[in-house]
Amino acid sequence: MTNQLSLQQRIHMAFPGLAAAYSVDGLLHYRVEKSRIPELTQFLHEKARGRLALLFAVDCRPLAEKYEIQYLFAFASDHPWVLLTIELAGHDRLFTSITPSVHAAQWYEREIRDLYGLIPQGHPDLRRLVRHEHWPKGTHPLQKAFPWNKTIGRQQADYRFRHIEGEGVFEVPVGPIHAGIIEPGHFRFSVAGEPIMQLEVRHFWKHRGIEKLFEQQTLSTAIALAERVSGDTTIGHSLAYCQAAETLLHIDVPRRARYLRSLLLELERLHNHLGDVGAICNDTAYALAHAHCSRMKELLLQLNDRLTGSRFLRGAMAIGGVTKDVSAIELSEIVAVLDGIEKDFAELESIIFANASLTDRLETTGVLTERTGWDHGVVGVVGRASGIDQDVRRDRPFAAYDEVPVNIALYRYGDVRARLRVRMDEIHESIRLIREIRANIPQGPVAPAAAHRPQPGQWALSAVEGWRGEILYFVMTGEQGSIHRCKVRDPSFVNWPAIQWAVVGNILPDFPLINKSFNLSYAGNDL
Amino acid sequence: MFRILKKSLKTGIVTGQHPHADQPAESPSQAVCEKAMPFRQSLTIREVDTGSCNACEMEMNALANPIYDIERFGVHIAASPRHADALVVTGPVTVNMEGALKDVHKQTPDPKLVIALGDCAINCGVFKGSYAVTGPVDRHIPVDVRIPGCPPRPAEILKALEGIRRPASWK
């Protein structure tokens, strides 16, 4: 409590006359004049060491003739979030860009410009981001006036890549369709010989209009869509969505259901981390480790299938709890499978680290420094490998993590090996957590209590530590239990720009390895 | 070295240790089976993601793991569409990927099969109607085989591929 006061007091001391519009446990909300936003965000970022966690716009029509832009800052674990809101009333389409002082805002502001047609003045790079060049001018799909099922025309135009010119400098285009079975995205390298001088990431090939599709759903039906934002993070996204909806519907989740949610989230983390460890080894041509890891991953997917009827745990999450209880027999089956995998994996770890040529490929490759990571607001596994000590499970405990605390794996080198080590440590930690959950799980119901009908215009924010990192959802209600706005932020959206800096100076053949060690989602990024 | 050998011996052969899938609801047509004739011994697949959620990709990757080991049926994954006999397309076709899908289809040499994998590729699934989605795969390129599911399990994909390459009518 003292810390919350101190942050509030510091803001008050630096900006007298600024009153918090809203202050609940864990969130300070300020409504501010739009002209003051650059100095305020600069203060929060540089002086108060806040991380820009989310920046998005809301079209308030038809309730009010205005747009709102919201800036969410996150601080060290015992401080509350700070949410700043500015208004663009009537025909106003301009706001001041904060990118010159808060670098992490760059993609967010370009996204707002594409989806809403609001112009961030002073932004150093106003090329299109989400809308590719062939979308006609004036197409801003998240404006309320834009029909969700409109057919978009085509125009002729080209994206301007950043070029490096000089003798012996070549450009290597990769994608959108890649050599492996992975998602589409474009990478443009400038190389001089083998070392990479510059990488430019060009994404949003699989933009499916998810945020607009959310607005066609009601609070209770949107969960199927949340599960499909990023297929490998089914539980992470559906849990984050459910938590926001539960806040709006005033539902208390039963204790047993909270434990089961933690269990499902850790199962999801396990199979993804095992797959990643194998894939990183495979990209150094170490096929043996890949074969063992994908075998263990398959065991977990089959376990998921037996538990929930879906290998990716789809349909397991419900607003208010979970759809299906897990019996004591099933819990002991889970722990028995995990005991086997832990032993199996420990043997594999000693094989992996006994291999000198593998270590040689991993060490000092793709270094993301703590400073670069901080400037981009990097989260999750990638952040923890670069010394950024951030984990929602500890900082803002959700599900059962307040009763089953997590130990965080933290490394400082920021290279591929550090990211591999974080994943390996988290595999052991997840198995430990699931054992704890089994030992402590209380009896009781798993189904939701009676629902409350929210007023239009109410909103809720929720955060979940998925296996990639912090997933954020902002949900605002509309008329009759519908969704007015749902902002989804997958950790990939903030981590993708950082990869452009992690590859500089590395040789081109190491890029697949570096990319795999980040293993970011294209679907969750493109939305 | 001994550690690796010991690990391999201890693990043994895991291939085929998966729950078995039911027969697909609809059996492939005669025309598709005839089209698949040249690929009975060997089939090379190029996977194209046109906007899926990544779950179908993970199941395609799972096909290559030691448990399903799709190579034992003569199915390979190619890195380029020019080396492919079949295109496996996942996801609804987004506005941004439409051009790339048509290019890939053009680059794949004839004769070729097009397999729509997963509900999204067949009918757009939960993304149906969105401004950013131009329609299912068969709106843009002719589709020969449809494998439904969200996502289809690897065993179901194996079964469907077996269905077109070794149809019951030939046995």
Image (cartoon, rainbow, N blue to C red):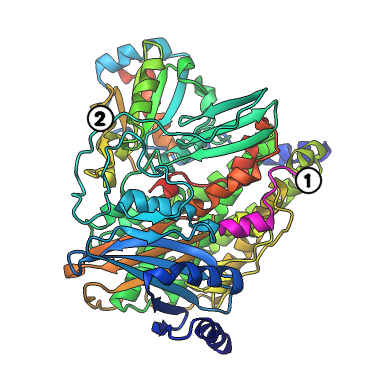
Magenta residues (range)? A363-377
- Does residue B139 lie above or below A88 as drawn? above
Q: Which residue is rendered at x = 61% and y = 28% of the image?
A: A165
Residue placed most toward the observer, A469 or A199? A199
Residue at (39, 27) in percent of width and height: B88
Q: Picture coordinates of residue A119 (x, y %)? A: 35, 54
Determine whether A302 is above or below B156 in the image: below
- Label for residue B26? 2
Q: Please, what secondary structure does the residue beneath circle 2 have?
A: loop
Q: Which mark is residue A514?
A: none
Query: In the image, what residue type sits under mark 2?
Result: Glu
Q: Residues within 10 Å of mark 1 (few under 14, many from 20)?
A: few
Q: Residue at x 24, y 54 (%)?
A: A143
Is residue A366 covered in magenta?
yes
Rendered position, A414 above or below A483: above
| Residue B38 picture location, percent across and down | 40, 10
The answer to whether one can see residue A513 in this image is yes
Q: Which residue is mark 1?
A: A353
Tell me: A258 left or right of A6. Answer: left
Q: Position of residue A177 (x, y in %)?
A: 46, 29
